[in-house]
Amino acid sequence: MTNYLEKFLMRDISKLYQNADDYNVIIYVGEEHNVSIFKAHSVILRARSSYFHAALSSKWAKKDDHGECYILRKPNISPEVFQILLSYIYTGGIPLEDDTIKSNYLNLMIAADELALGELIDHIQDHIVAHEVNWIRDNLVQIIQISSKHEACHKLQLICQEILDNDPSAIFQARDFVMLEEQALIDMLKRDDLEGKEITIWEHVIRWGLAQKPLGSEDLSEWTEEDFTVLQHTLKNCIPHIRFFHISGSDYWDKITPYKKLLSKQLKHELKTYYITGRLPTKNVIPPQRMGAITNNKSVLICWKHFCQIASWIDEKTTRYKPHEIPYTFDLLLRGSRDGLNDLNEFHQKCDNVGPTIVVIQVADLSGKIVGGYNPISWKSESGWGETNSSFIFSMENGKTLDNCMISRVTSPERAIWNAPRNPCFSHDLQWFKGKFKQSSYEKKIYDSEEFTMIDIEIYRIVKKNEIDIDMEIDNVNNGLQLYKDDGNDS
């Protein structure tokens, strides 16, 4: 009954917003040619906002010439945003799904923070986190910059940090990427864990530079010396962090030489020497290849930190590999959500006789638990035990952090791997097609329960990085850059 009566109370108070004929507050909102006048009641404003409670106090408030109405001015809030907030103050509601409001999420939170409407900021953030993940990714840069300046937006700051921890390259995909501040871009370029090809990172940096100071023409062939000078000055602090020596010869020729006037003479000489002879410069330290070289297909279950941990376990390292130190690549063979979650035929077709693999499984667990195992020998369709003393199974708290990681190494090598047409598994200890754990051939349990439900699975083939492959890549680069060799022009 109480809730029923409260509805009538809110209905009647909201009428004051629509018909403010007995108002005693006039608020001028906006600036220059975009100013709107709002009329309100001091008793409502003071009750709903500590900001207005102070602003309308006898100590601070100013009245009109007749002494009848309080006069307030808010030039730093747009009329559109203030109207939404004033409606919320009177009605207690805000339709966050409306396109008009959705386009003003950030401005609403900034203004709500100024007007001390903390509960509204929390409500907007909760809605965004729960229902607007794509909006977060599109507006990642603005959210990061605004949330870092407004402590009340800490929930959005945390979700943005989580996105970047799992996928630093997401910043380049944001619709507002070009709004990124220079130092933030430089910090991003310094990271080893950026995913994607280096040439793609170069293209993003060029796009950012052109957005800072647009040139006279978008057609590169029409650029003047001054245009190149302007762009060179804009990017002078970013270019040193591009890892040019990890860019293929063909990409360098096609996508960087058109901008070669942006590069120093020394860098152009070093690159030309590298692409012709395969020799790296000795005076400067060459930064390592980025995270993109670790896996050929981005995981939807775990992030780069987990690949570093798994590689360290494989080599029995006491400290975790950094991304550029990993001596393996991880080639995705099968993903349950893509290829069939319990499709045994698909498993054997894609995963049999390929050599070492890791199995990564997401469990139907409130925390998003990850379990899996390393098989250093090939899976097979024929029933029988696979013997190895190097296999292990593992668990991780979730696919985002390395908290509570656990490894369980094999203790009965002769019963380490069970090959079968219908139930390939890590002995009895991890039977993912049956959804069962039973400690048997590995040193400890990796999960509290003996049964589980699999949400998704990924299986990766593990390939040892090989210096022969590197030499072949250099040969390919040399062949691809014969034109560069013949060009003989460093300018």
Image (cartoon, helix red, strand yellow):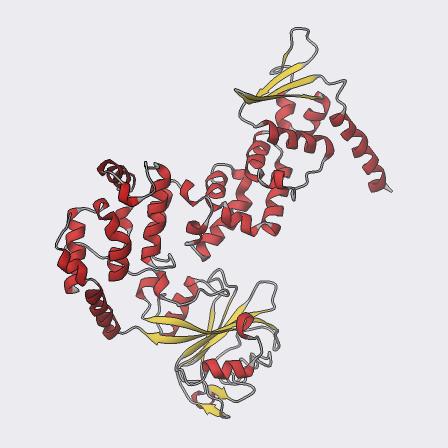
Please tell me which residue is depicted at 50% across the width and 48% down the height of the picture: 138
Along the line of sight, the residue nearer the viewer: 96 or 45 = 96
Residue 25 to residue 225: above or below:
above
Asked which quadrant contains residue 63, the reply is top right
Query: Considering the image in quadrants, where does the N terminus appear?
Result: top right
Residue 420 to residue 328: above or below:
below
Horizontal and vertical percent position of residue 295: 39, 67
Along the line of sight, the residue nearer the viewer: 288 or 349 = 349
Q: How many marks?
A: 0
Say left or right for 156 vs 241: right
Horizontal and vertical percent position of residue 215: 32, 37
Along the line of sight, the residue nearer the viewer: 75 or 486 = 486
Say left or right for 3 vs 115: right
Horizontal and vertical percent position of residue 140: 48, 46
Say left or right for 444 vs 21: left
Horizontal and vertical percent position of residue 121: 60, 39
Instruction: Say whether residue 419 is visible.
Output: yes
Please tell me which residue is depicted at 52% across the width and 38% down the height of the picture: 151
Please tell me which residue is depicted at 53% across the width and 77% down the height of the picture: 445
Say left or right for 20 vs 424: right
Residue 491 to residue 357: above or below:
above
